[in-house]
Amino acid sequence: MKLSSDQATRYARHVLLDEVGARGQLRLLGTSVEVRGEGAAAEEAVRYLVAAGVGEIVVGADLRQLYSETWADLNPEVRVKSGGECRHRLELGPSDSRLQGAQAALKVLVAVGVKGEA
Amino acid sequence: MTDRSHTRALVVGAGGLGCPVLLGLAEAGVGRIRLVDDDRVELSNLQRQVLYGVSDVGRLKVEASRDRLERRFPDLSLEVEATRLDATNVSRVLDGVDVVIDATDDPQARFTINDQAVAQGVPAVLGGVIRFEGVIMGVQPGKGPCFRCLFEGPPEPGEVMTCAGAGVLGAMAGLVGHLQVQRALGLLGDRPDEAAGYITTVDGLRGTTRDVPVPAREGCTACAQRTASSFHFMTPSTQENSMSVAIKIPTSLRRFVGGNDQIEVAGQNVREALDGLEAAHPGIKAKICDAQGNLRRFINVYADQEDIRFLDNLETPLGEGAELQIVPAIAGG
């Protein structure tokens, strides 16, 4: 597997990181994350996972709708769906803290992109 | 919720930090936001600049963010300007705002914002992010340290890394941006003292943040611009001489030390400790000190939480079990 030239551009700031590189980006593209939560924290986590190219993201129905209505073109190659099995799960509950959401997304990006989890 | 509908915030930069800052401020009910940025959206931005989409590529960021924010926050009054902030326009841009957030990726702009905010009495939140690390600092003009108290001047071009050159993990920008929002709301709130006077460093790989107190620096040229400034300058303390020193290594230098975040060395003062570090891990000292052996001006070293520039610099004595923390300034945004 190799990154396409569009992907190499889109994810250039990740590929530049020695700790991530093209291999880490390919792992991100191949993984899946379920984000549970109804508040802004969950929305923020999803935004950063989508932007980072996490291949498949499972969210609740409301967030799925918000996503398709307002910011689905952030990264069209990511699938955001409302059901299915995932390798990782984030529990954000009703929290409206976007800080907490970004932190949760960061944890997944480090685990998969840097530390090599699938 | 606190009524912030009449609060006016200035956001400088609509990039990696600007996106979360804008979302966070609007959501916190800040009624008026002035946004300044002259950049256009590129595909490589979309890995972390979460306000935009592929349909925005090529557009001015201020226009793309206005469209996105107005749809989501119809009550928000957003004033945008497609300008690069510099010394010629900073006083006009800062005029009349309650708080300014530096969301630029330009260290020169960071000092320009800091200096003018201090001079005009506008509370400021400075921030930077690169690779897996970030820094945030809240400044209350005339009531404590500013960014120039901490770092005397911007680096020479090429002296520090930028995101374009060194990369950044996408969600790091979100984390640092939202910490900036938190700090800005703190400066606007009832207890602004709790939001200033220290620098927060973020270690994304470990998921930790650390608040390091910053003393105001006597002779700081930015603070001198503010005539009403009459704050207390911290007096350096000295310590007993002894042996074992723990050096906290920032993420940007860990490649020299096998990825460790802390190295134990022997030394009776900072110079000996850094020499010990160099002996064990050749190459690292050149990143901390210049060719003359002096501390690089964009690196700060804290001995037990005190900036060694206010102590005896490299000759600052270290006690048994002392802790040295190396804090590099960060260019990216």
Image (tube, rainbow, N blue to C red):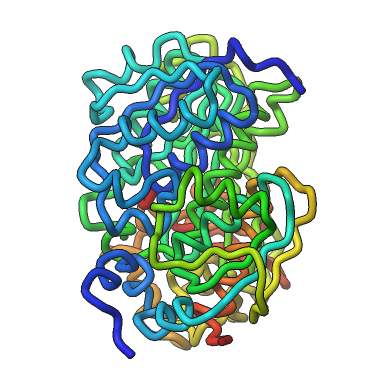
Left or right of B282 on screen, residue A112: right
Q: In the rendered view of the protein, which quadrant contains the N terminus of chain A? A: bottom left
**Relative vertical location of residue A65 with respect to residue B85 in this rendering, above or below:** below
**Relative vertical location of residue B94 with respect to residue B269 in this rendering, above or below:** above
Q: In the rendered view of the protein, which quadrant contains the C terminus of chain A? A: bottom right
Residue B47 location, x and y as percent? Answer: 39, 60
**Relative vertical location of residue B198 with respect to residue A83 in this rendering, above or below:** above
Left or right of B72 on screen, residue A85: right
Which residue is drawn at the image coordinates 52% and 20% (left, top)? B76
Which is more toward the observer, B39 or B287?
B39
Which residue is drawn at the image coordinates 49% and 78% (left, top)? A113
Q: Is residue A43 visible?
A: yes
Residue B168 location, x and y as percent? Answer: 41, 63
Residue B118 location, x and y as percent? Answer: 46, 21
Which residue is drawn at the image coordinates 33% and 58% (left, top)? B163
Q: Is residue B318 visible?
A: no
Residue B110 location, x and y as percent? Answer: 37, 37
Which residue is drawn at the image coordinates 60% and 44% (left, top)? B179
